[in-house]
Image (cartoon, grey):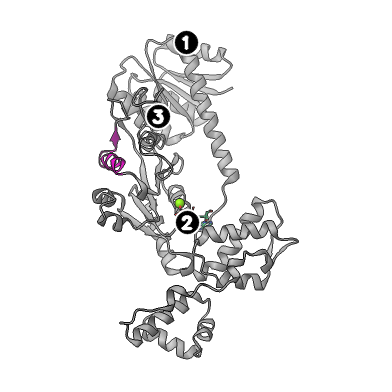
Amino acid sequence: MASILIVDDAKNIRDHLTSYVRGLGHRTKGAGDAREALAALAEDRFDLVISDVRMPDMDGLALLREVRGRRPDAAVVLMTAYATVPQAVEAIKAGAYEYLVKPFTLEQVGLLLDRVLEVQRLRHEVVSLRQALDEPALLDSTTPTMQQALATARQAAASDVTVLLTGESGTGKNVLAAAIHAWSPRHARPFVTIACTTLAEHLLESELFGHMKGAFTGAWKDKPARIAAAQGGTLFLDEVGDLPQPVQGKLLRFLEERRFEPLGGTETVEVDVRMIAATNRDLEADVRAGRFREDLFFRLNVVNVTLPPLRDRRADLAALTDHLLAVVAARHRRAPLHLAPEARRVLTGYRWPGNVRELMNTLERAVVLSRGDTIRTEDLPDRLLAPAPAGAAATPPTDLSLEELERRHIQQVLGDSTTLEEAAARLGINATTLWRKRKRYGLD
Ligand SMILES: Nc1ncnc2c1ncn2[C@@H]1O[C@H](COP(=O)(O)OP(=O)(O)OP(=O)(O)O)[C@@H](O)[C@H]1O
Ligand SMILES: [Mg+2]
């Protein structure tokens, strides 16, 4: 049973609909105008509002906007005899679920109710599943580059500005995209992710923009655009660097105009979404190589947030490890686990080429393998214990001055060490000498 508010200034239509919907087993309330409707909404929770468009004083579209603002959970269906395209587009843009064209039969209303309430039900289910599954992220840091990235992301979240997230694989771009949405005024509306890698070109295009039945072989029914599913919320384009060229052009047009036509369609759809894009590629290099459109790059790169690799966040490693260990233990329904000091040393000494994802996977494996409440070195994969391959660093370029060579070597060792003492020991000098050299080379 759902609760449904029916708004119409024509008493006979209102009464007729109210009694029909009540007959279907729902709780209903009638309202003669928008003001009455808003008063009812302030008092009670409704799953669905069915409202006439043409009403004196405040019309259905204005009511729709009020409802979206005050009760984003409630679905809204508008009824009108003036089913003109611009009005329909405007209603959908403002968040209406459906449009009922007068004159309609009661059977049509019944079918529509089923559909809308099913969507509502699934939406609630998704929200509660997400809440149950969602693992908190650790979004603070003591590393200046990370602090800067988080500060920029928080600032950008407050506005509708397009954000491009860059950084190596596993640094947390997806996590941060979701956080930006959660920090933004759009947080109660959908967050829709589209992975640009996984789909073939024409599938990606129809995923993004939707298609009409018969638009291409295999399009046996209309498919709604995922872009439109993000209406009022945030659209996250993941791995945007993998977008095929023709889709890049279409996306650019959408970013410029905030409207598009579904494949094989003639009507233009307008949507209001906030865009976030992410990539682990060097997009600027792709632009230079002609693989990625420069104009699209500029549209996406309004605010850039670059997540530093984990090896440059040594200071965060301990806190992140503890946080992820708790997350993973909970995921496996295990009591809180401790790290043996030696195991912690191993984790701290490793370079983490796979970044936070590799740390997470390593801890998950360790939690599964460990016995009792302590994770020991034996529970960690062998690659963490083996010394880092020396290959790359073995042959420095021969045109470097001795001083530059020293500077680079010190920088590298500092990056790989947790403490100044450790770095000094590796370099074979004392900590005071290292401290002085570090100052001189501007490495602090
Ligand atoms: N700050 C964080 N707190 C908790 N978990 C994190 C954090 N950052 C990343 N993770 C975890 O690390 C893993 C990788 O993160 P994510 O998928 O966001 O990386 P990515 O940068 O999008 O990588 P890719 O470029 O490969 O898509 C995920 O399991 C995520 O939950
Ligand atoms: Mg990702």
Disc 3 crowd, CA 10 A, few/some/many (<14, 14-19, 20+): some
> Where residue 337 sits in the image (x, y, percent)?
69, 61
> Along the horizontal axis of the image, is 301 left or right of 132?
left
Q: Determine the residue positioned at 31% across, 26% down.
A: 264
Q: Determine the residue positioned at 24% across, 49% down.
A: 295
The stretch drawn in magenta includes residue 252: yes
Q: Nearer the viewer, residue 442 or 264?
A: 264
* Residue type pointed to by label 2: Gly
> Where residue 89 sits in the image (x, y, percent)?
32, 27
Marks 1/3: CA–CA distance: 26 Å
Q: Can the viewer see residue 101? A: yes
Instruction: Identify the mark nearer the N-term, 2 or 3.
Output: 2
Above or below residue 288? Residue 218 is above
Q: Determine the residue positioned at 61% across, 60% down.
A: 363
The part of the image, by quadrant, that contains residue 235 is top left
Name the residue beneath numbered marker 2: 172
Question: Helix, strand or loop at disc 2?
Answer: loop
Question: Helix, strand or loop at disc 3?
Answer: loop
Name the residue beneath numbered marker 1: 106
Question: Helix, strand or loop at disc 1?
Answer: helix
Marks 2/3: CA–CA distance: 30 Å
Instruction: Identify the mark nearer the N-term, 1 or 3.
Output: 1
Q: Which residues are magenta?
A: 245-260
Name the residue beneath numbered marker 3: 224
Question: Residue extending furthest left?
Answer: 295
> Along the horizontal axis of the image, is 435 left or right of 156?
right
Disc 2 crowd, CA 10 A, few/some/many (<14, 14-19, 20+): many
Marks 2/1: CA–CA distance: 50 Å
Above or below residue 172? Residue 345 is below
Quadrant of the image containing the C terminus: bottom left
> Where residue 115 sits in the image (x, y, percent)?
49, 22
The part of the image, by quadrant, that contains residue 94 is top left
